[in-house]
Image (cartoon, rainbow, N blue to C red):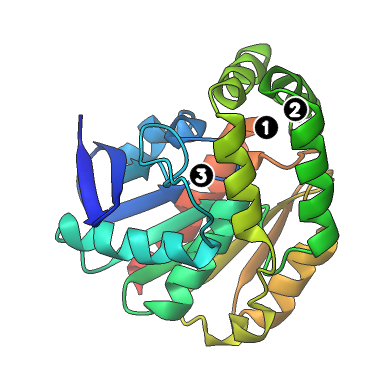
Amino acid sequence: MPEAQVSDDVTLYYEEEGEGFPLLLIHGLLSDLTSWRYQIDPFAKHYRVITVDLKGFGKSTKPSEEYQVHSHANDLNAFLHHLNISQTHVCGLSMGGMVAEVLAIKYPKLVKGLILADSAAMIADHAVSDRLTLTADHDMNWFANWGVKKILRLASDEAKNHVREMIRRVDRTDYRLALISTAGFNIANELKKIQSPTLIIQGEKDETVPMWHAEQLKNWIPGNKFIIMKGASHMTPVDNPDEFNKLVLNFLAEVDKT
């Protein structure tokens, strides 16, 4: 299995497909690198596509103690150095977008083009506490069925089944620690530091990350491109992969020209 030890206590599992300039895809909560299954082949025709399980998810290290979202950015910086990558395009979904924002702010030379899908620059304390309550009251099978209904509207039955099984694979303790990692996250005042050309994609019907989060990103990140995907919910790369892939590839083609 391809693995990279990024610190004394964290090893990340990853997969690669394609050749050329690198494109790093960062998944969100209740997910793993397989959440990008509908992007791999289309993107790999143009880029060296790298998917990775963040710590706490998939086949990567499962922390036993609390950690913060910002630590994922440090992990990924070390991970990219492990692969001898000095610059890459970065696409993050939901929490993965939060990680991508931190990566672009903290390591500006590392991120050439930035795509933020259904993401945010801050997380309210009550949102974390509400989800922690659900975690205490329900098992992951319940979360799988609840999640599919909440984050997908346009997706095929096959895609919904895939997401349902992906969520079921997440251990409840790992999910709890991941939720806690987002508590207090707020980098709104730092968004203006992002230097990378940025594409913001927001699902029109996203109830998990409401539209005002996307509007905040739009208003605070310099020179971004902002697109609303009609009818889509929170997980746009899965809900409408054809449109999502087209938007991302068109954007990156423009970035590559410059």
Q: Which residue is mark 3?
A: 27
| Quadrant of the rendered image containing residue 18 | top left
Look at the image and tell me in which quarter the N terminus lies.
Answer: top left
**Mark 2 residue element:** loop
In this picture, residue 255 sits left or right of residue 183: left
| Quadrant of the rendered image containing residue 33 | top left
| Quadrant of the rendered image containing residue 188 | bottom right
**Is there CB contact under 8 Å for labels 2 and 1?**
yes
Residue 201: x, y in percent?
A: 65, 55
Sequence-first disc among 2 and 3: 3
- Would you place residue 110 above or below residue 169 in this image? below
Residue 115: x, y in percent?
A: 52, 59
Q: Which residue is mark 1?
A: 239
- Would you place residue 21 above or below residue 156 in this image? below
Q: Is residue 79 visible?
A: yes
Residue 11: x, y in percent?
A: 28, 46
Q: Which residue is mark 2?
A: 154
